[in-house]
């Protein structure tokens, strides 16, 4: 099953590790530094030039990618809830973090 995360980009649900609200993520200097280093090492994919709203972290087994998405975390979570087998038990109070690893 696939999740549309913005523009023409879709990712397999079973590859998603986390969907993170960009506002809560950017509050930490360590997070900002991590994202900077990940970008320098080509692990970051900016989906569009629209203002970023969420980070979608994926793992293909061979490579980890961080997608910067213009779609809000809550919208991505709602989209993924339509899929069977998606674990939504890690949503925080603001909907800021979501683990979507499938429970196959």
Image (cartoon, rainbow, N blue to C red):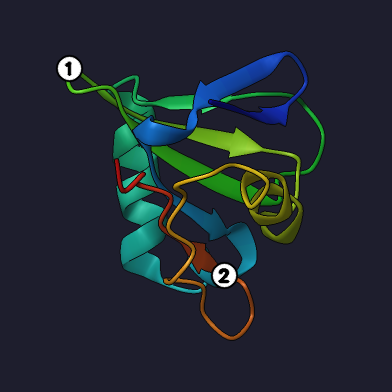
Q: Which residue is mark 2?
A: 96
- Residue at image position (59%, 42%) is 83
Q: Position of residue 47 (x, y in %)?
A: 66, 24
Q: Position of residue 96 (x, y in %)?
A: 57, 70
Tag of residue 1? none
Q: Which residue is outermost to the right?
A: 50
Q: Which residue is mark 1?
A: 62
What SS does tag 2 mark?
A: loop
What SS does tag 1 mark?
A: loop
Q: Is residue 83 above or below residue 22?
A: above
Mark 1 residue crowding within 10 angstroms, few (<14) / some (14–19) / many (20+):
few
Q: Is residue 92 above or below residue 38?
A: below
Q: Is residue 94 left or right of residue 41?
A: right
Compute the Cα span from label 2 to label 1.
26 Å
- Residue at image position (29%, 38%) is 37
Quarter the C terminus occupies: top left
Q: Nearer the viewer, residue 24 or 34?
A: 24
- Residue at image position (28%, 22%) is 60
- Residue at image position (30%, 50%) is 34
Q: Nearer the viewer, residue 90 or 64?
A: 90
The mark that comes first in sequence, 2 or 1, is 1
Mark 2 residue crowding within 10 angstroms, few (<14) / some (14–19) / many (20+):
many
């Amino acid at each position: 099953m696939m999740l549309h995360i913005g523009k023409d980009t879709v990712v397999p649900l079973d590859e998603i590790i986390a969907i993170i609200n960009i506002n809560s993520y950017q509050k930490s200097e360590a997070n900002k530094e991590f994202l900077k280093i990940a970008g320098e090492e080509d692990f970051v994919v900016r989906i569009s030039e629209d203002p970023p709203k969420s980070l979608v972290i994926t793992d293909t087994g061979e490579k980890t990618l961080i997608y910067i998405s213009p779609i809000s975390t809550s919208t991505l979570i709602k989209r993924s809830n339509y899929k069977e087998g998606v674990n939504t038990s890690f949503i925080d109070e603001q909907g800021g973090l979501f683990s979507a690893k499938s429970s196959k």
